[in-house]
Image: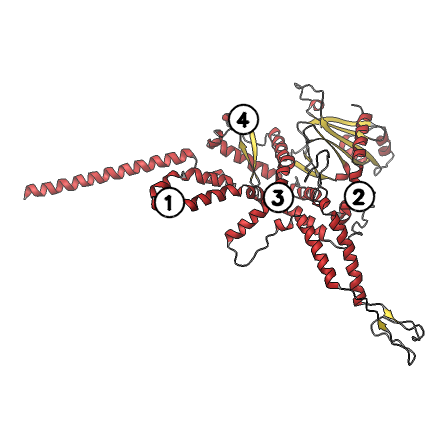
Amino acid sequence: MDAEKYISRQEALEADRRNWDYHWQEIAEVVFPRRADFISTVVKGEKKNTKVVDSTAIIANELLGAGLHGMLTNPASKWFKLRLTDPRLMKDTSVLRWLEDVERIIYMSLNSPKASFASHMHELYLDLTAFGTGVMFIGEDPDTGDLTFSTKHLKECFLSEDMNGFIDTVYRKFSYTSRQIVQRWGIEKVGKDVREAFEKGEFDKQFDIIHCVQPRKDRDYNSLARDQLPVTSTYVLCEGKHIIDDGGFEEMPYVSPRWAKVSGETYGRGPGVSCLPDIKMLQEMAKTVLKAAQKIVDPPLLVPDDGALNPVKTVPGGLNFRRSGSDPITPLQTGGNIPIGMEMLLDVRQRIRSGFYIDQLQLQQGPQMTATEVLQRQEEKLRLMGPVLGRLQTELLGPMVERVFNLLNRRRKFPAAPEVLDGADYDVEYVSPLARAQRQTDANGLLRVFEIASPIIQMQPESAQIINGEDTIRWLGDLFGTPNSLFKSEEEMEQMRQQQQQAQQMAMLQQGLEAAGQGADVLSKLNQG
């Protein structure tokens, strides 16, 4: 494709998204003000929260974004594990240790300060909960090989789906100064317009650039050249319609999760979209209640038209003179009912908080609750977010872990894999608190079996032998994300059992020898007698 075709495709995607821009602008103004520049250019440093009277929606969006970050991708805890699709290989101790080493390296790379993973993930969650769609770029530093994460403004990104409904095309339109363009690509590649601006000293002149990422249709599968990789990466300078760079990626570098999606639409809809009517109503109600409160605290005055000698002074300690016999200055009682207004405000605020899943994130602890009841209630609430978790695993967490794994593997950051792993397929298992809550039903079912079977075991103790204790503990450890290194391997358990059997046999032999010796002593004494 030439530059004109890339630009035409971007313009078509932008035209298809125009209605979304107006919708997102309306949401951003009352939910995520610092993103409120979808349909207008905002001057740097300009106030962006001028339309917000009540900040309930802003706080709810912040809480939901922080809660998702803490329950799905918390840097302080383990939130995913690598597994093999072949269950037989998962019993090999060397394979389990290698998988744990790989996981440790991935976590170290994600938590590196240079990667900025935590801050950009939080920004992504805020976009996702407010607008229903977020975009993040996952790359690497070409010099050091360190991972880099960058959440992109939804205003810049234009998306397209494949036939299965997955985002496979991202066109991002952004601006660079002439100095930034030359720094990144060199003076030889930047084109005539940028070169002239740079040579004239116009270092801060802005130029529009389109980054086009999409599947490559025609490619040489035997070639490893940048322009033959499976995913295209083309930078187009809009001024002059010049292609600055044409390369590629081994896999899609952008992850574009949607909170919830309607069939036939490319972009998602989040809690900010669902709660927008209540949020807009809350702003108007807050204005009304404030006006009513102002009239009560500082009421309008009833002044006789010819009774006051001077302009009425409403400042503290002010003296107002009136003619004798005239009516006094009195406040006007408007009859406003502040309690009803506050009750209505609280009702709308609660609906907004419920729409942002705050009830699921914050446990309302009642009196006399045991620790088990607290955990069970919290897990039940988190299970209500199951549909959201499923989409996020498919469109965010899965592609992200796969991209990170491939980047580190190509950089040879992992130790040598055991030979049994040649050609093995990997899978990602999520062990975050939210993912564990979804699977807690299995553990509760096992505990329920033990409770019901307890009277039977008391009557027939031999029936407890039906339970395989070792497999049960391993299954529970796997369910709760416990590291495999904390459990003995099957080979170690077998060796320990053999040692115990040998010890028992030696003890029995020793007892037999001692009994035989005692019998010989008794026989000797009888013979002597």
Give the crowd class for mark 4: few <14, some 14-19, many >=20 residues within 10 Å: few
Q: Dot 3 corresponds to which residue?
A: 385
> Considering only order in the chain, which callout, 1 or 2, is on the residue closer to the N terminus?
2
Q: Is residue 92 above or below residue 117?
A: above
Q: Secondary structure at mark 3?
A: loop
Residue positioned 40% across, 35% down in the render: 492
Nearer to the camera, 335 or 70: 335
The image shows residue 365 at horizontal and vertical percentages of 57, 55
Distance, label 2 to label 3, CA atoms, is 30 Å
Q: Of discs 4 and 3, which sits in the foreground?
A: 3
> Considering only order in the chain, which callout, 4 or 1, is on the residue closer to the N terminus?
4
> Considering only order in the chain, which callout, 3 or 2, is on the residue closer to the N terminus?
2
Distance, label 2 to label 4, CA atoms, is 48 Å
Q: Which mark is residue 456?
A: 1
Q: Of discs 2 and 3, which sits in the foreground?
A: 3
Q: Secondary structure at mark 1?
A: helix
The image shows residue 293 at horizontal and vertical percentages of 78, 64
Give the crowd class for mark 3: few <14, some 14-19, many >=20 residues within 10 Å: some
For the residues bearing labels 2 and 4, Cβ distance under 8 angstroms:
no
Q: Dot 2 corresponds to which residue?
A: 37
Q: Dot 4 corresponds to which residue?
A: 424
> Considering only order in the chain, which callout, 3 or 1, is on the residue closer to the N terminus?
3
Q: Of discs 1 and 3, which sits in the foreground?
A: 1
Give the crowd class for mark 1: few <14, some 14-19, many >=20 residues within 10 Å: some
Q: Amino acid at mark 2?
A: Asp
Q: Amino acid at mark 3?
A: Met
Distance, label 1 to label 3, CA atoms, is 38 Å
Residue positioned 82% across, 72% down in the render: 316
> Considering only order in the chain, which callout, 3 or 4, is on the residue closer to the N terminus?
3
Q: Of discs 2 and 1, which sits in the foreground?
A: 1
Q: Amino acid at mark 1?
A: Ile
